[in-house]
Amino acid sequence: MRVLKCDCSKGLNDNCIQAAMAAAEDIAAGNLIVYPTDTVYGIGADIYNEVAVKNLYLAKRRPFDMALSVAVADRKMMESVAILNETADKLIKAFLPGPLTIIIKKNPEVPDIVTAGSQKVGIRIPDHPIALEIARRSGPIVATSANIHFQPDAIDIGMATAALGNSVSTYIDAGHSPSGKPSTIIWIKDKEYEIIRQGPITEDMIKEVLQC
């Protein structure tokens, strides 16, 4: 277990890039990381490494029938995980990178353990330079809060280390979470949608975009 500190308040510097590289190397090795996002700290793993994903469930004490979200670096990477449609495109252009998780049909290559056997996947592009740099280097990673299941979300690295300890190889400490609130989750069903969790992006904001 190691904690790497970096200040990315003014963007990526050499220290932050080195931390992101170290985290990406851990992910490639099948290990777990904790990383900052624009909402709360997340615990990450390679979504295509089923052993690593299983270890993540165990570290969080999260039931295996509860799906995990995925973080990607950009829209192109999003297409490798999910099957996008016009509704998703409107939301991506309006809100991503940002605190919105879109649940939509997954690509068959995404392991069932990530989605708890569902054919849908929750996916987002975090608006945080460290999270984006890690995803650029490692590919799609798990994006779920760095806490024990049903315990408070980690808004600083101390909360994450206290909860997850040595089950995580690398913690990246970028200070207090910018918002401290989890993302809005929206389930897209063709042209219809359902708000699963209300977060920083409100239903009124979503309605305005989708009605255009």
Image (tube, helix red, strand yellow):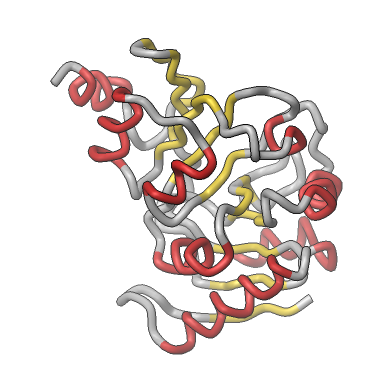
Name which residue lies at 13% across and 21% down.
212
- Please provide percent x and percent y for residue 12: 38, 78
Which image quarter is the N terminus in?
bottom right
Name which residue lies at 35% across and 47% down.
98
Q: Considering only vertical position in the picture, is 132 above or below 189?
A: below
Front-lying residue, 77 or 207: 77
Q: Considering only vertical position in the picture, is 56 above or below 100?
A: below
Q: Is residue 112 left or right of residue 186?
A: right
Name which residue lies at 74% across and 62% down.
32
Residue 112 figure quarter: top right
Q: Is residue 110 visible?
A: yes
- Please provide percent x and percent y for residue 37: 48, 57
Residue 167 figure quarter: bottom right
Q: Is residue 60 visible?
A: no
Q: Is residue 69 left or right of residue 149?
A: left
- Please provide percent x and percent y for residue 172: 59, 72
Residue at far left of view: 212
Give the total of numbered labels: 0
Front-lying residue, 115 or 171: 115
Front-lying residue, 137 or 16: 137
- Please provide percent x and percent y for residue 20: 54, 75
Residue 150 figure quarter: top right
Q: Considering only vertical position in the picture, is 162 above or below 6?
A: above
Q: Is residue 55 left or right of residue 70?
A: right
